[in-house]
Image (spheres, rainbow, N blue to C red):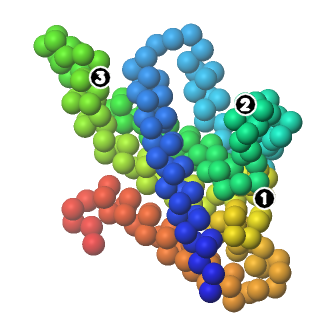
Amino acid sequence: MDLFPVWLSLRVATISTIIVFIVGTVLGRLFARGTFVGKTVIRSIFMLPLVLPPTVIGFGLLYLFGREGFIGSLLNEWFGIQIVFTWYAAVLASSVVAFPLMFQSAVTAFQQYDANLERAAYTMGAGKWKVFWTVSFPLAWPGLLAGVILTFARALGEFGATLMIASYTKGLTNTLPLEIFFSVESGNQSQAELFVVMMVVLGFGTVFFLNKWNGSPYNN
């Protein structure tokens, strides 16, 4: 039994989660407490992947990062890097699709505590970074952790955008969702069933952990 799709999916989901966590946390803090022109418009753009079909997102990424795309052509010309049809493309697709979950969780997390706690730290002479790491981040951590879990689960199950920009190449870009689809297409029902069970177990474990962590101490 070839377990490559399992390890690839876990690798893609982990890397995507790390990227999205960093970017989502920084932008979430900015949008939670900052005030600037165009804030609502930009926030709406960030949330678009949550409502757009994955194929539309994949098409947009292909348009930007393809060989003839604006970003893709620059990467290829300047650094000799090709994103599309590689597992890096799967990371890119998963990151974009999962980003709104982390971003929204971060915004909510940074809004839920009293901003006066930060101001008090400033009056005591602490700088911005020190206030962030010693006050803001610890207070927002429960909400950020929930965002991390949701991000990982979404990245793990990403299919449409990944298929558009990474395609399906055995031993290279065949993540679990893609492998399930093409196993069914090729008539390999037993393999598809086994991978489906794996996806359900991974998904259930992720959601169970989130519910257990967020739930009452009396939950079983």
Q: Mark 2 and mark 1 in contact? Answer it, CB < 8 Å.
A: no
Q: Name the residue located 58 percent from the left edge and 21 percent from the top edge.
A: 40
Pointer 2 local density, CA inside 10 Å: few below 14, some 14–19, many at least 20: few
Do we see residue 132 in this rendering?
Answer: yes
Give me the disc on residue 21: none
Residue 69, percent across and down?
82, 34
Considering the numbered disc 1 on the image, is that residue within a helix, a strand or a loop?
loop
Give the image quarter of residue 79: top right
Residue 202, percent across and down?
49, 70
Please tell me whether residue 75 is drawn above or below residue 122 in the rendered image: below
* Kind of residue at disc 1: Ser
* Kind of residue at disc 2: Trp
The residue indicated by pointer 3 is 129
Q: Is residue 79 left or right of residue 21?
A: right
Q: Name the residue located 21 percent from the left edge and 30 percent from the top edge.
A: 134
Pointer 1 local density, CA inside 10 Å: few below 14, some 14–19, many at least 20: many
Please tell me whether residue 33 is drawn above or below residue 210 in the rendered image: above
Give me the disc on residue 167: 1
Q: Earlier in the sequence, mark 2 or mark 1?
A: 2
Q: Nearer the viewer, residue 58 or 8?
A: 8
The residue indicated by pointer 2 is 78
Q: Quadrant of the C terminus?
A: bottom left
Considering the numbered disc 2 on the image, is that residue within a helix, a strand or a loop?
helix
Outermost right residue? 68
Q: Name the residue located 74 percent from the left edge and 44 percent from the top edge.
A: 82
Please tell me whether residue 35 is drawn above or below residue 60 in the rendered image: above
Q: Earlier in the sequence, mark 3 or mark 2?
A: 2
* Kind of residue at disc 3: Trp
Residue 44, percent across and down?
62, 29
Give the image quarter of residue 137: top left
Outermost left residue? 124
